[in-house]
Amino acid sequence: MNKSNLLLQEVLSNLQGCSDLIIQPFQLGSLPCKLLYIASITNTQLLREAVTKPLLEEATRLQTDEQLLNRIQDEAFFTISNKTASTAKDVTDAIVAGEAALYVAGQPHMRLFELKQYQSRSVPESTNEVVVIGPQQAFVEDIQVNMSLLRHIIKHPKLKTVKYEIGRYTRTTIYLTYIEGLCKPEVLKEITEKMDSFDMDSVLSINYLAEYMAGTPYSPFPQSQFSERPDSVASALMEGRVAILQDGTPFTLLLPTTFFAMMQSAEDYYQGFYPASWIRLVRLLFSIMSLLLPSMYVAMTTFHPEIIPTSLLLTIASARENIPFPALIEALIMELTFEGLREAGIRIPKPLGQTVSIIGGIVIGQAAVQAGIVSAPMVIVVSITGIASFIIPHFELSLTLRLLRFPILILGGTLGLIGIVMSLFITYWYMVNLRSFGIPYMQPLAPFVFQDLKDTLLRVPWFDMKRRPSSFTNTNQLKRRSSK
């Protein structure tokens, strides 16, 4: 058996069991040929028009097989991207990825054609990062569409992409994207080393990468940021950050990140600086409330009633008169119930989710108060806490604060305000020492960088934000250059 037939047999052996594999034999002069492709992921119409038809027309025009072989070996003969492969593994990997392979008897290699065709949805509106004013586009599961959306915004040759294929079975396409000259070289080097060392059977979501690349994997705080908005990703790239796009995932991973970066919303930059700054302060206030409100209520009613005004204290005492549980147990019951309702609202069918969560919360809360299981003030406190947690722009940070709420609540219910202060000190100390790819998590507050405060708690006017944040870049920091 010659090398040509041996290559074909090895490829067919590797693909044995693929019921949707198409083996299309045809004749070019006296040369037996075969086209191998998987119909479900290959553009068969383009295959006929750009490969089969030109080959058959050329076979009728040329006189000898040698002339025909020379034409086939010429890459410029075909109008679509093509290359050759001489090993069974390379050919097999290309076919299962959606490419078509051309076998010509007597040739020691096969020619591969880029004809991938995956089902994808049209570009939708953003559903998780909603803005009133600003672009409405969101990423989809097709990485090529996502890159086109990104390049539509950043039209510059320094927008660089590095392609990876990770996952031994899934062979998932990953694009590491950055702007050359803005990204810190040491950050890019660390991310690249992480990508090169990635070794798993499958990568079904960008979350796999986020968890693997975390510098402190057991930290409750997210060390990377997700975004489904092309404009948000473009803005992050122009700050000097790195974006990782994955085929099959409508979310992009942004590295590195900080606490204050995750407290910002895309709409902060589409409104005037006065309303944007006010909304940021409100967001920060409610984020603190979502973390501390239940524990503060329990600590004050249990250990420090003298802090509460007399009239309010009497109202709370009368509401709790017939409650059989201490305030701590009462708060834990309501918090766990609220978490269950929230999870149920996500998991049940979408048309029913909002109705069930709203009606379920009202009915259960009212019934629990009437039954004397919990007090009305506790229901109000937990409801405000739940609403406050929805104000945080990024779900991963919101989830972290929801998790931290429980240990702080237990410390507040057992040690009073001392327990709350102690837990806050430990949390802040931990956040100050946390790093995301070498970037301090609490920068520009700790370490203090005055220049970067212009886009942290407040947002100053655009004409005052002349420099990129030093958290993410230490080169080419100047955004606006003098016209002189």
Image (tube, grey):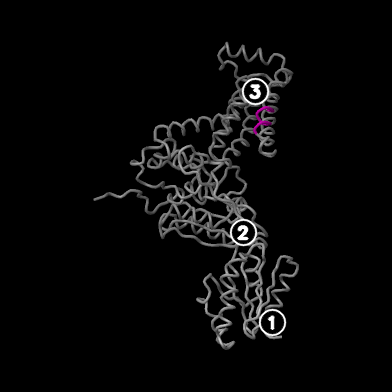
Q: Nearer the viewer, mark 3 or mark 1?
A: 1
Image x and y of residue 417, in percent: 58, 25
Image-based side of 154 in relation to 195, left or right? left
Task: Classify the position of the N terminus by image quarter.
Answer: bottom right
- Which residue is at the front of the view, 318 or 409? 318
Q: Secondary structure at mark 2?
A: loop
Residue found at the very far right of the displayed protein? 17
Q: Which residue is mark 2?
A: 118
Nearer the N terminus, badge 3 or badge 2?
2
Q: Main SS type for the magenta part?
A: helix
At x 39% / y 32%, what residue is drawn? 274
Residue on which disc 1 sits: 5
Disc 3/disc 1 C-alpha distance (Å): 75 Å
Q: Is residue 64 left or right of residue 336?
A: left
Is 81 or 273 nearer to us in this picture? 81
Bounds of the magenta span?
354-360
SS class, disc 1: helix
Pointer 3 or 1: first along the chain: 1
Measured along the vertical axis of the image, is residue 110 above or below residue 222?
below
The residue pinned by badge 3 equals 379
Amino acid type of disc 1?
Answer: Asn
The answer to whether 119 is drawn above or below residue 44 in the figure is above
- Residue 97 or 297: which is nearer the viewer? 97
The answer to which image quadrant residue 184 occupies is bottom left
